[in-house]
Amino acid sequence: MFEVEFKLDGMKTVPTHKNCGFALGEKQADKFQRELVKSWGFESEDD
């Protein structure tokens, strides 16, 4: 799983990589969201 912190970009929160500060790409953000939901014990909407 990525080490992520959320930063404001205008009125949106953007997941950014904690070490380098770059915003996660679309694929990385999707993967992060799936892993996060799975780690919380919820079923994914995709399943």
Image: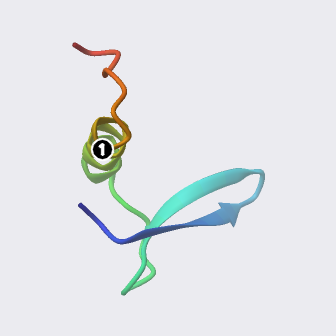
* Colouring scheme, one of rainbow, by chain, secondary structure, one colour: rainbow
> What's the amino acid at mark 1?
Ser
- Horizontal and vertical percent for residue 19? 37, 86
- Could you tell me which residue is drawn at 45 percent across and 81 percent down? 21
Q: How many marks?
A: 1
- Could you tell me which residue is drawn at 31 percent across and 49 percent down? 32
Of helix, strand and loop, which one carries label 1? Answer: helix
- Horizontal and vertical percent for residue 23? 44, 66
Residue 17 vs 32, above or below: the answer is below
Residue 16 vs 46, above or below: the answer is below
Which residue of the protein is positioned furthest toward the right in this rendering? 11
Residue 5 vs 21, above or below: the answer is above
In the picture of the structure, the residue carrying the numbered disc 1 is 39
Figure quadrant of residue 39: top left
- Horizontal and vertical percent for residue 3? 35, 71
Closest to the observer: 15 or 1?
Answer: 1
Closest to the observer: 3 or 39?
Answer: 39
Which residue of the protein is positioned furthest toward the front in this rendering? 41
- Horizontal and vertical percent for residue 2? 28, 65
Q: Is residue 37 left or right of residue 11?
A: left
Q: Is residue 7 left or right of residue 44?
A: right
Which residue of the protein is positioned furthest toward the bottom in this rendering? 19
Figure quadrant of residue 25: bottom left
Q: Locate the C terminus by quadrant.
A: top left
- Could you tell me which residue is drawn at 27 percent across and 15 percent down? 46
Q: Locate the N terminus by quadrant.
A: bottom left
